[in-house]
Amino acid sequence: MQSLRIKLAVGVAVLGVAGVATAAIAHDRSRMDAFLTGYQEPPAISTGANGSFKAQINRGEDEIRYSLVYNGPFNPGATTPTAVTQAHIHIGQLSINGGISVWLCGTANVQPAPTVPKPPDCPAPGVPVTGTLTPDHVVGPGGQGIQAGEFAELVRALRAGVAYANVHTTTHPGGEIRGQISDDRGRDH
């Protein structure tokens, strides 16, 4: 009888641990995402383009692995071809423009300062761009309280929901598609 009680107690303990682990995974604040559209740009931009951004902050909170994919057509009514020139994470709440914090991709003509690691080249629409961000990638924005290299401040801004992914094009140099980055707690994108 006592053996049955011990087995029952062990079983309950295992289920309890599994339940806590499941709850922790369900509220994983290390995974972030955003859906990018022209309607999130201030002012809103009517474009055929969209995109998605996914990121994961590592346990040590000193790296962010990301994937960005955008799809065209960018500015479908343009008389000249529109090309992606750069993409970033900016610090700014929904519908407010903010400064660049990190580069996600660039082109031969559009790059961060030479003191910052070169981001991946911006690919053709539909091709994912991936990378890993570290403190060396953080460029600011100093005017918003984040100095170069202050990775912990970038992570705080991401978790607070005041960062967005933005894709800039030749037709819309200020940004053609944008998405507010959020974690799995269900904040509006």
Image: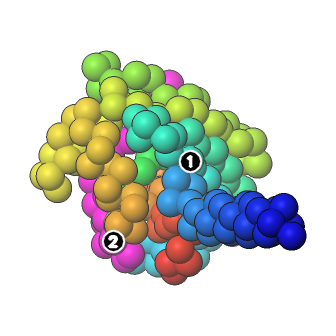
Judged from the image, the secondary structure of the residue bearing numbered disc 1 is strand
Which quadrant of the structure image shows residue 177?
bottom right
Residue at the image point whose x is 32% and y is 56% from the top: 156
The location of residue 164, given as percent across then percent down, is 43, 61
Q: Is residue 106 visible?
A: no
Q: Name which residue type carries label 1.
A: Gln
Residue at the image point whose x is 31% and y is 19% from the top: 114
Residue at the image point whose x is 80% and y is 66% from the top: 2
In magenta stretch: residue 106: yes
Query: Label 1 neighbourhood size at 10 Å, few (<14), some (14-19), many (20+)?
Result: some
The location of residue 176, given as percent across then percent down, is 51, 62
- Give, as a single range, the part of the protein colored magenta: 91-110
Q: Name which residue type carries label 2.
A: Gln
Query: Label 2 neighbourhood size at 10 Å, few (<14), some (14-19), many (20+)?
Result: some
Extreme top residue here?
A: 114
The location of residue 50, given as percent across then percent down, is 66, 64
Dot label at residue 35 = none
In front of the other: 181 or 127: 181
Judged from the image, the secondary structure of the residue bearing numbered disc 2 is loop
- What residue sits right under mark 1 in the picture? 56
- What residue sits right under mark 2 in the picture? 93
In front of the other: 13 or 108: 13
Chain-order first, disc 1 or disc 2: 1
